[in-house]
Amino acid sequence: MSKKKVKKLINGKGIRYDGRKLNELRPIKLEVGVLDNADGSAYIEQGKNKILAAVYGPKEVHPKHLAMPDRSLLRCRYHMAPFSVEERKSPAPSRREKELSKVIREAFEPSVFTEYYPRTSIDIVIEVLQADGGTRCAGITAASLALADAGIPMRDLVSACAAGKVEGHLVLDVADLEDKQGEADVPVAYMPNLNAITLLQMDGMLTSEEFEQAINLAVEGCKQIYQLQKEALKAKYVEVKEAKKEDAEQ
Ligand code: CDP
């Protein structure tokens, strides 16, 4: 990948190359209900990441033999558009995308009440339009809103964020350059009300103390993201309420 190598990612005052403090998230924009033809949808911008999430279901399972008698089949497809990264990506699903689809599905399994909808499927589709590090986490944050928008009952929202180690410092919400040049990346998905982690991965090298600190830092990030998710959901329902009021007045 041809991203320019920046010599120093963190200055002497503990400020990162993009102006953030060590424990600061990138700016996040969330929007719920952005696609008319999906049952639920959401859009996220986190720094330079731009990601759409759509949810279909609960609906009839195709192929039929995959249907389960006691619960809904939860499926996930994470995909990066060819133009989402610096070097054009083949549209065919890569090994990385298959792995991410699996871990993202697993991040939602503890949350979704799949047992409410036997013999059906719930499909989560995540399309990365522009990537700048941390797309699995941003994808989870958006997909969680899309599930809520589809009206699918969940034990808790899932919020996700990575922490990492860059030039010897633990940092929150690792951007692409920090991921490439840094020492480690720890993506975490978290259910804030249940205080439960549903995805935990690590790429790189950390001591066991640093690993624990990175998890705690990522969880703090998830808690901040959870507040933004709640606001985004409320904003959608204010819009719906206002639209209904206008209809009634006409
Ligand atoms: O995106 P995330 O951090 O969850 O996954 P990653 O595999 O650690 O990828 C980190 C970043 O590498 C992505 O967010 C992209 O910005 C970049 N990447 C890329 O430029 N080309 C690819 N084919 C895959 C990833």
Image: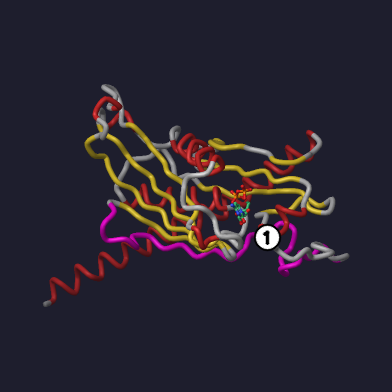
Q: Main secondary structure of the magenta part?
A: loop
Relative vertical location of residue 30 with respect to residue 159 in this rendering, above or below: below
What amino acid type is highlighted by mark number 1? Glu
- On whether residue 56 falls in the magenta region, the answer is no
- On whether residue 19 falls in the magenta region, the answer is yes
Residue identifier under label 1: 24
Residue 41 location (% of width, % of height): 35, 55
Secondary structure of the residue carrying tag 1 is: loop
**Residue at point 15% right, 72% down?**
247
Residue extending furthest right?
12
Residue 142 location (% of width, % of height): 45, 53
Residue extending furthest top?
69
**Residue at point 48% right, 34% down?**
106
Which stretch appears magenta? 13-38
Q: Specify whether 22 is left or right of 250.
A: right
Q: Nearer the viewer, residue 126 or 208?
A: 126
